[in-house]
Amino acid sequence: MQITFLGTSSGVPTRSRNVSGIALRPSQRAEVWLFDCGEGTQHQFLRSELRVSQLNRIFITHMHGDHIFGLMGLLASCGLAGNATRIDIHGPADLERYIKSCIRYSHTHFSYPVKIHPVQPGIIYEDNEYIIRCGPLKHRVPAFGYRVEEKDRPGRFNVEKAKALGIPPGPVYAQLKRGEIVTLPDGRIINGSALCGQPEIGRKFVYCTDTVFCEGAVELAQGADVLVHEATFSHVDAEMAFQRLHSTSTMAAQVALAAGVKTLLMTHFSPRYAPGNDIILEDLLKEARAIFPNTEMAHDFMTYEIPRNQELVSV
């Protein structure tokens, strides 16, 4: 499971940071899942190692422009390139009306199916390997955070042990690998889990923006391997954060601490903390680490791989 930041600025782009967008590449799949799509996201794709042709699922947190203004351009480009087969888009209830209006007034036609899924708190997608949930955050408009859970996998199947027990190779091995209880032709009952090693624990990725500190974020992030959380403001500007319902660096750290996550990656920074100002982004990082030491500050095109041993490795 690999994540790539395509935009880490809040509100407006800067010379070095685009507005919100983060891509997830699920393990062993030629797929890209995109979370938020600020203006210019398709250009960020071109500058990254990601393939827009693999984009098949998009998750929108809320309807503010810095999170959706790049959506129609990206979808139109996918159609013109002729390589999209289907894209599913998940987001707030107003998202479908917004996209349909853009299609109508821009006279855009997609050459591939686009399915829009209005989200409600709870499970919004599940397949054999992943469960994706969303939960409410606290912002000026309805906003949702997303949690991607990789399902646990059975441990390595011990073929030598199975042969030693006289279990003949064949379809029964597949059942035993899944940990099923199997009755053999000779009447013996074999528990597949006894022939497998320790299960591989699935990884958990959580994305929370835009929001002020709230219990919804803490609940969504429980036990996550990686929490990506907005940190628009410095702790010094906490009053402004409360007024605008955004988070400070310390609020992001408090969510990470309360949720027991392994690593916090902060994003969505206000341009007011540019180099040369009284407060700079490095100050926000110090503020967060004073509460939650395992904190990093994201930048555009930063990529993180979360290996199965749950140790975070940066690339």
Image: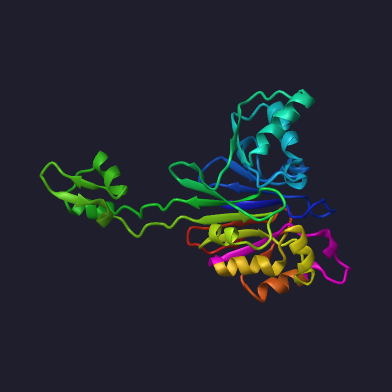
Residue 14 image offset from top left, x and y in percent:
84, 53
Residue 303 image offset from top left, x and y in percent:
65, 55
Residue at the (25%, 57%) spot, across then down? 194
Q: Can I make out residue 27 in this image?
A: no
17 or 120: nearer the viewer:
120
96 displayed left or right of 306: right
Residue 68 image offset from top left, x and y in percent:
73, 42
Q: Quadrant of residue 32?
A: top right
Magenta segment includes 270: yes
Please identify the quadrant where the C terminus is shown: bottom right
Residue at the (71%, 73%) spot, across then down? 287
267 or 258: nearer the viewer:
258
The structure's colour scheme is rainbow
Residue at the (62%, 69%) spot, across then down? 254
162 or 288: nearer the viewer:
288
Residue 258 image offset from top left, x and y in percent:
56, 68
Q: Can I make out residue 115 in this image?
A: yes
Name, please, the residue furthest toward the bottom: 290
Magenta segment includes 297: no
Residues rendered magenta in the picture = 259-282
131 displayed left or right of 117: left
92 displayed left or right of 272: left
Tell me: residue 153, above or below residue 287.
Answer: above
